[in-house]
Image: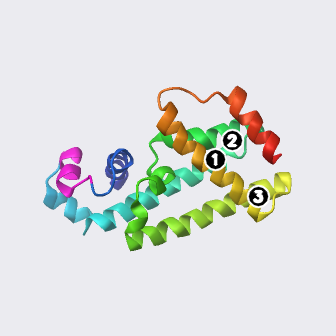
Amino acid sequence: MKTPILEKIETLFSENSFAEVSMDDIAKGLDMKKASLYYHFPSKEQMFVEVLEFSFSKYKTYLTELMENPSLDKILLGIIGYPMESKNLFSVVSQKGYCKIGVIRDLIVLKNMELLEIFYRYFHEKYGFNQEKTMLLQSLLNDLSKKYCIFDCHETLDSGKLIPEIIKIFF
């Protein structure tokens, strides 16, 4: 029952910052009364935390499944392109200044540590990466995700040029 609500709210927050979205906007976007929205979520911050948890779960599942792909090119490109293709809030949350809100910042830090562990397990097991090299690769891919949005939102990345360079540097 709550999943469709969380999906709609996730879209609102992935397209706008926390401060730009009011409870009135959310209620209107969900086609419900504001009082009904408060029935599901006691505050905007609590709602955001629930949406972020929901979004993280989808992102984590995506990454876990993506890393089963035998093609390193597809894995790297999938990590870079996912935020724009999916409108997944967690994958872009650090780009929108959410780290200014304590409870949200703490959740982002915790979940990012969990993602780093997923990356580390995969790249250590498959390629012998240490934690620092894994963090550098993850940082590069995250930064490219941001640039993908800023410079190339409606086009696909030229994997023929970008991915081989990443592979040359890291692998």
| Lower sequence index among marks 2 and 3 | 2
Taking the spot 14% from the left edge, 61% from the top edge, the residue there is: 35
Q: Left or right: 170 with respect to 22?
A: right
Disc 2 target residue: 76
| Lower sequence index among marks 1 and 2 | 2
Q: Left or right: 78 with respect to 121?
A: left
Crowd rating for badge 3 (residues with CA inside 10 Å; few <14, some 14–19, many 20+): some
| Lower sequence index among marks 1 and 3 | 3
Q: Is residue 85 visible?
A: no
Q: Which residues are magenta?
A: 20-31
Circles 1 and 2: CB distance less than 8 Å? yes
Q: Secondary structure at mark 3?
A: helix
Q: Splitting the image into 4 quarters, where does residue 112 fall? A: bottom right
Disc 1 target residue: 141
Quadrant of the rendering where the C terminus is positioned: top right
Residue 74 at what x, y percent from top left?
70, 36
Q: Splitting the image into 4 quarters, where does residue 168 fall? A: top right
Q: Is residue 163 above or below residue 125?
A: above
Could you give the CA–CA distance between mark 2 and mark 3, rounded to whole angstroms? 15 Å
Disc 3 target residue: 133
Q: Secondary structure at mark 2?
A: helix
Label 3 sits on what residue type?
Answer: Lys
Q: Splitting the image into 4 quarters, where does residue 50 fall? A: bottom left
- The residue closer to the viewer here, 48 or 6, is 48
Crowd rating for badge 1 (residues with CA inside 10 Å; few <14, some 14–19, many 20+): some
Prevailing secondary structure of the magenta residues:
helix
Residue 91 at what x, y percent from top left?
51, 51
Q: Is residue 36 above or below residue 140?
A: below
Label 1 sits on what residue type?
Answer: Leu
Residue 13 at what x, y percent from top left?
35, 50
Label 2 sits on what residue type?
Answer: Leu
Q: Is residue 170 visible?
A: yes
